[in-house]
Image (cartoon, rainbow, N blue to C red):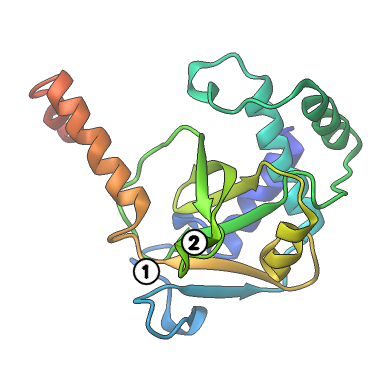
């Protein structure tokens, strides 16, 4: 798996998809983002110089390691035995098709926040952020240094078609969703975790930050 990880880390940094690839910048440049009018900093990045086959394979290898791990941090990443066998075969053989099997979408935070780790979790997200009546999609959510990865848990051709160029591996051009750190779910969740930690261990959190 090291061969997947080394390539992925280098490429994510080169394409400024993770904060460690930004140098001293505090945010992405305006010309890197295509903003959606009226959605306050939310938009997309177009990336057409990354090997999407290798990127999807690298991400699937991370998902596979999480689902076979016995570590407490990965307890939410569980799938059916036949899904796990299928994923194992794909990672071992280097195959990424079909793209409808745990399709992948990427999102990144366009401004820096607190550096932290977050264990992968199971979530449901809206099919359409502007229309709550369209229901939700079950996902596995992974977080890496300002980059959020969504693995869709249902193999539905309709959902895959709707993802278009936002699905990793679909074509030459990849669209990555973008939003600022301020006001993001990531920031809100971190604040909740810090408050819970302070309640359980009063006074210790401040000492950790100062160390």
Determine the residue located farthest toward the left in the rendered image. Answer: 203
| Mark 1: few/some/many CA within 10 Å (<14, 14-19, 20+) | some
Residue 210 badge = none
Tell me which corner region of the image, top left, top right, bottom left or bottom right, holds residue 94. top right
Quote the CA–CA distance across marks 1 and 2: 33 Å
Name the one closer to the observer, 48 or 34.
34
* Residue 128, visible in the rendered structure: yes
Which residue is at a point 36% across and 51% down the rendered structure image?
A: 185
Mark 1 lies on a secondary structure that is loop
Name the one closer to the observer, 17 or 148.
148
Determine the residue located farthest toward the top in the rendered image. Answer: 70
What is the x, y in percent for residue 28?
A: 42, 72
Name the one closer to the observer, 48 or 64.
64
Is 133 above or below relative to 201?
A: below
Q: Which is closer to the viewer, label 1 or label 2? A: 2
What is the x, y in percent for residue 121?
A: 50, 34
What is the x, y in percent for residue 139?
A: 59, 43
* Residue 168, visible in the rendered structure: no
Q: Is residue 164 left or right of residue 42?
A: right
Look at mark 2 in the image and give the residue it sits on. Answer: 133
Report the label total. 2
What is the x, y in percent for residue 174?
A: 69, 69
Mark 2 lies on a secondary structure that is helix
Q: Quadrant of the C terminus?
A: top left
Q: Is residue 130 left or right of residue 112?
A: right
Tell me which corner region of the image, top left, top right, bottom left or bottom right, holds residue 161. bottom right
Q: Is residue 129 left or right of residue 202?
A: right
Look at mark 1 in the image and give the residue it sits on. Answer: 27
Mark closest to the chain's N terminus, 1 or 2: 1
Which residue is at a point 56% across and 59% down the rendered structure image?
A: 127
Which residue is at a point 68% across and 52% down the rendered structure image?
A: 104
């Amino acid at each position: 798996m090291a061969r997947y990880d080394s390539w992925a880390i280098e490429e994510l940094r080169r394409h400024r998809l993770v904060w460690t690839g930004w140098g001293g910048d505090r945010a992405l440049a305006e010309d890197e983002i295509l903003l959606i009018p009226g959605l306050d900093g939310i938009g997309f990045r177009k990336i057409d110089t990354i090997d999407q086959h290798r990127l999807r394979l690298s991400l699937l290898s991370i998902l596979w390691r999480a689902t076979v791990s016995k570590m407490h941090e990965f307890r939410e990443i569980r799938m059916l035995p036949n899904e796990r066998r299928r994923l194992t075969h794909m990672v071992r053989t280097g195959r990424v098709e079909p793209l409808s099997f745990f399709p992948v979408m990427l999102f990144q935070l366009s401004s820096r926040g607190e550096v932290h780790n977050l264990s992968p979790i199971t979530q449901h997200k809206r099919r359409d952020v502007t229309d709550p009546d369209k229901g939700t999609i079950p996902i596995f959510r992974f977080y890496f240094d300002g980059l959020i990865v969504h693995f869709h848990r249902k193999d539905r051709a309709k959902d895959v078609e709707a993802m278009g160029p936002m699905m990793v591996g679909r074509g030459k051009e990849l669209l990555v969703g973008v939003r600022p750190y301020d006001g993001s779910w990531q920031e809100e969740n971190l604040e909740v975790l810090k408050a819970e930690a302070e309640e359980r261990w009063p006074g210790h959190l401040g000492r950790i930050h100062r160390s």
